[in-house]
Amino acid sequence: MYQEKIMALSHVQEKMSDEIQSYTKKRDTIQSSLTTIEHDLDKVNTRIESYYDLISRAQYRLPTIEGAVKELDEELKLYGVTIDVQHLPPVESLKDSQRVIEESMNELEPVNMRALEEYTHQQQRKTKLDEDVKHLKNQRKNLIKLVNEITDKKTERFNIVFNEINRNFKDMYAKLSEGGEAELKLENPNDLFSSGLTIKARPRGKKVLLLSALSGGEKSIASLGLIFAIQQYDPSPFYVLDEVDMFLDGVNAELISRMIKQNAADTQFIMVSLRKIALKEANHVYGVTMQDDGISDMIGNIDPDAVGPEGKIQTIMN
């Protein structure tokens, strides 16, 4: 009877031992899992603390970074550079670009530390020069305006004087040539002060010719007509004429002498002539004759009829 109980108890003990062993294994497994979980939890806590530390430091640096970004934006605007944030190149590409730029900067060494100071000085100098250039441009503009105004006035005055003298010349030539026609022509009316002057004349009974195509006497008539035309517009104190009647015939020489006498009422004429008709119209006559010894001799208050054909007479009409 006791053996049965003992066997039953032994059987229960074995069963309990198996269960205890099973629970021990489960406990060990749970303990191991708990240790692993605690270890993982420590890692998580460590990472969280690291993240908190990074966040704290990032929050501490955030105002500085924002200020730097703001300055960078202002500098980019200053140079007109626009950055598309959505299409930024990869970080590695930016690092490569940075490395290349740093190498290029290193090649620029040694750096002049006074470059910024010198740049400021040169910038101020450039500003001053720009102001001077602007001032000179304004002065040039004003001078050009003044020159144009003076040129317009000169042109206007020149045209007035030219037209008046040309009118006088036409009338005077008609008188001297007894019905001929003449006029003054500008070679380039668009460039008054650099172009030349042409005299066109048509002696009575002939075609219109330039002064260079006229005969000696016709040239003398045209030239004297221009002199008298200028005198009529703006007389000079006196005129000196040297044998202007040399190529004229008797009729024209007498006509010129009378014209000179007529104009001598307002202006003094000193005329060198060999023509007796000129002496006839003179107010005062002075002669110059050549002696046998080759020395010239002055003769005053002479009788024109006593002068031989080889004598040279100086006639003064006033």
Image (tube, grey):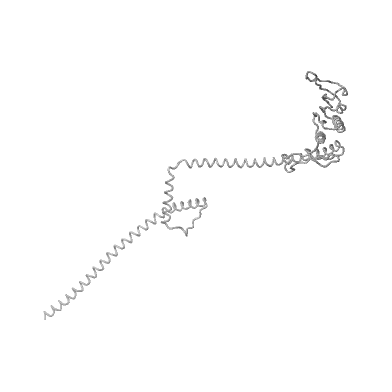
Task: Please give the count of numbered marks on the rendered protein.
Answer: 0
- Residue 209 shows in this picture: yes
Q: Quadrant of residue 153?
A: top right
Residue 33 rendering spot, x and y as whole percentages = 27, 67
- Residue 270 shows in this picture: no
Residue 77 rendering spot, x and y as whole percentages = 52, 52
Furthest residue to the top? 293
| 174 sits to left or right of 45 | right
Q: Quadrant of the N terminus?
A: bottom left
Closer-to-camera residue (306/224): 306
Q: Quadrant of residue 157?
A: top right
Q: Quadrant of the C terminus?
A: top right
Residue 218 rendering spot, x and y as whole percentages = 82, 36
Closer-to-camera residue (136/259): 259
| 318 sits to left or right of 53 | right
Question: Where 178 sits versus 39, above or below?
Answer: above
Residue 213 rendering spot, x and y as whole percentages = 79, 39
